[in-house]
Amino acid sequence: MRTEAYDAVDAARDGAWVAELTHLMDLTGWPKGMRVIVRKERPHPGAQLRFEDVDGMRVTAFATNTVRGQLPDLEPRHRRRARCEDRIRIAKDTGLANLPLASFNANRSRRCAPPSCAVVALAAEITAWTQMLAFGETPARRWEPKKLRYRIFTVPATLARTGRRVVLHLSARSAWSGLTLTGLGHLADLAPG
């Protein structure tokens, strides 16, 4: 039996459903208590369809051992957790992959490893919070660091000093200067004083 799926603010999402398919599958090799939950939804307008989309509907599934909770509540929780794990993957790809020794334990035993791990974690946190605060509900909020570097951090700019003030001039030729200015404005609004 399918039920309506929830969006990020726990409201019923039009054109999206969730269902449990555990009873239709053979889970003999899986740990006890595992459940398989499937989400079916219409892709957003302009989305590129994939070959595994069925009848124009996007289908995603996940397995969980959570026994309590309604299906519409479990599915958004899983998507939020997936976003967190995606940030961990990004940290591993960008900074943690460049540690000097092959294994994590070997790097942990070195004197320099914990500070370098902390610096990578701090950089990932600052990037995530900056995106959330500066870009609000725009797609730029979920860009990966590589796309941020290409589109936002490389906008040509000059600094001008005038009357004890420093003014940042962004290039009008850049396609992303408007978004950069909007983000900087949101961050400036949050600054104390």
Image (cartoon, rainbow, N blue to C red):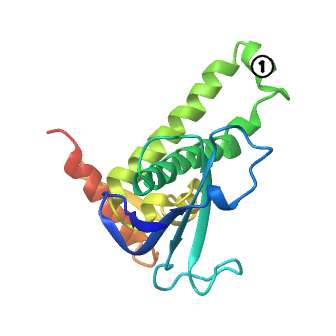
Q: Position of residue 178 (x, y in %)?
A: 35, 72
Residue position marked by numbered label 1 in the rendering: 105
In the displayed structure, does residue 152 sit left or right of residue 191?
right
Q: Determine whether, in the image, residue 53 is placed left or right of residue 77.
A: right
Residue occupying image coordinates x 70% and y 77%:
52
When asked about the image quadrant of residue 72, the answer is: bottom left
Q: Measured from the top left, where is residue 110 in percent x and y?
A: 75, 14
Amino acid carrying label 1: it is Asn
The residue lying toward the viewer, choosing from 98 and 102, is 102
Q: Nearer the viewer, residue 70 or 23?
A: 23
Residue 142 location in percent, x, y?
48, 59
Is residue 155 something that shows in the picture?
A: no
Where's residue 53, x and y in %?
A: 64, 79
Above or below, 149 relative to 107: below
Compare residues 10 and 115 and report the one nearer the observer: 10
Number of numbered tags placed on the structure image: 1
Whether residue 6 is visible:
yes
Tell me: residue 66, above or below residue 104: below
Frontmost residue, 113 versus 23:
23
Q: Quadrant of the C terminus?
A: top left
Identify the secondary structure beneath mark 1: helix
Which residue is at 71% across, 59% downward?
25
Is 32 situated above or below 54?
A: above
Quarter occupied by residue 103? top right
Residue at image position (51%, 41%) is: 67
How many neighbours does mark 1 have within 10 angstroms: few (below 14), some (14-19), or many (20 or more)? few
